[in-house]
Image (cartoon, coloured by chain):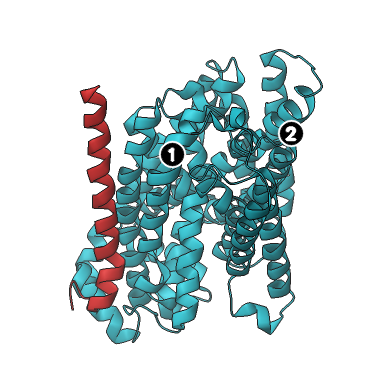
Amino acid sequence: MYLLVVVIIGVAASRFQRTEEDFWVAGRRFGLGILVIANVAAIMHGGSILSGIAFTGAFGGPATTPFLAFAGGIAVVFFWIAKKLRRSGGFTIPDYMGDRFDSMTLRAWSACVVAFSSIIYLIAQIRGMAFILESLLDIPFLWGVLLGTVIFVFYVALGGLLAIVWTNIAQFIFMWVGLLILLPPLLERIGGWTSVMTSVEVVSPGWTSLTGTGWTGLYMISWFIVWFVAYSTRIEFVTKMYAARDDRVARQSLPWTALLIILFLLYGIIYLGAAARLLVWDQIGSPDQAFPVMVQMLLSPTMAAIALTGIASAAMSTTDSLLLMSGSAIAHDLLRKCHDEPKGIVRDERYYLKVSRITIVVIGAIACLCALPDMALLLQIVSYAVAIVGSAFFFPLVFGLNVRRISSEAALASSIGGVCVTVAWIIAVLLGQTWAKGLHPIIPGLITAGTLMLVVTLRTSPVKQQALDKFF
Amino acid sequence: MILGLPIDSFILLLGLPAIIIAVMFYYSSKIKSEKEDE
């Protein structure tokens, strides 16, 4: 029934798509309530529940859920990014990079980074969704991947951001209902928050401490930095600012977004992670099974299906945003802005709408094929995609929007240097190099990006005033 | 211990994020009144 609902929404939303502005930023019509839901749904991915419960269950609650980093990252968007980004009137992050730094190279580079990292992220999300569909519908993993991909590609390709937001509202309700129906049986078995935290500390010493059951202080700090940068640069979240009715709505949505995410994760990850540690930890082969096993233990088959549908909703709500991001990077940024417009090629809006839809189908198919082979924990894949995006855009966004002096050469050097070092570090980790494993790839990436931005800015001239007028 | 958590965990998990969110809400309400002033 849930899958049918999202398909119907996609068909209905397709009737409102006439221009690129309708498709990519839903005609910039979002009010406060809708934008808050869209923000939360874009951030709360399938991995945040499924892998989140596995992660907190294994390593401890406060250590693995850096709420301080989440709130701090969203505060950066609130104070330094949202207002100017919305006022600039673009569609995508590559639009910002191209306009602010008056550089076609930077626009094309940014589009490639967005497309590449979104596809990596998308692969993780499709796998998360397939795991859920596998247990929910009792079908093989392969069919879970295919079914999930076909459905969200269908509604995103037809309805664009409007379909995403309408489905996000449905997904938001499913997500909360799915998790909250676990609460009564859990309260009966293990008690409320304080009782669960006290019990889990007895069973697993260190679970409630800042460094968890086995992390070092240094690893915890780098984990906080990863998520701080992630929350201030997540493209599927920051891009939503463009869809706000005005810059005031864009900014006002942010404290509500931070509050809802923290409330959601306090229960959805920390309380449920502790419950999983107490109730099912001895019965599972891998931490990723914690949530499905707990659901089956506590609920009747019908109620368990509702709970798992809630998690599938969380997976789908990020996946659709990512698909739209990667589609916009290719159809809008690369084809229209970097190829057609500089060459004076004029095409009508229907042509770009058609290309956007075809691009989304092709990217969905590529991500679907890449999601089939077995791979590491979802959150690890997600954190690599986040690291690439963070090292590419953190400094150009935060400093580019607030310091006039930042030159296009500095932004380009910072973005390319940051991504190259991050990717090299990820490869070293994947190859099993012990020197690389102690530090998350985003840390050397950010240090390189920040240093290059500073050094190159001091040696080059600022962007010309005409380009800056839009932002200052 | 507060809510079953050690003090430092409580501050980092809930205390500081709550302060940051409260500051955002405060400035968010100011954006509204600036608009109304206009």
A363 lies left or right of A447: right
Tag of residue A82: 1
Q: Is disc 2 placed on a helix, strand or loop?
A: helix
Q: Nearer the viewer, residue A187 or A318?
A: A318
**Residue at the right extreme of this rendering:** A343
Residue B38's spot in the image, x, y percent?
25, 21
Spatial separation of the CA atoms under disc 1 and disc 2: 24 Å
Q: Position of residue A432 (x, y in %)?
A: 71, 79
> Going by the image, does A212 lie left or right of A403?
left
Q: Amino acid at mark 1?
A: Ala
The chain drawn in red is B
**Amino acid type of the residue that numbered disc 2 sits on in the rendered structure:** Leu
First of labels 1, 2 by sequence position: 1
Please state if A420 lies on the left or on the right of A214 as rendered: right
**Residue at figure coordinates x 59%, y 31% from the top left:** A465
Mark 2 crowdedness (10 Å alpha carbons): few <14, some 14-19, many ≥20: many
Q: Quadrant of residue A452?
A: bottom right
Q: Is residue A36 visible?
A: yes
Chain letter corresponding to the colour cyan? A
Residue at screen point 46% across, 53% down: A231
Quick check: marks 1 and 2 in contact, CB under 8 Å? Answer: no
Residue A428: x %, y % from top left = 72, 74
Mark 1 or 2, closer to the camera: 1
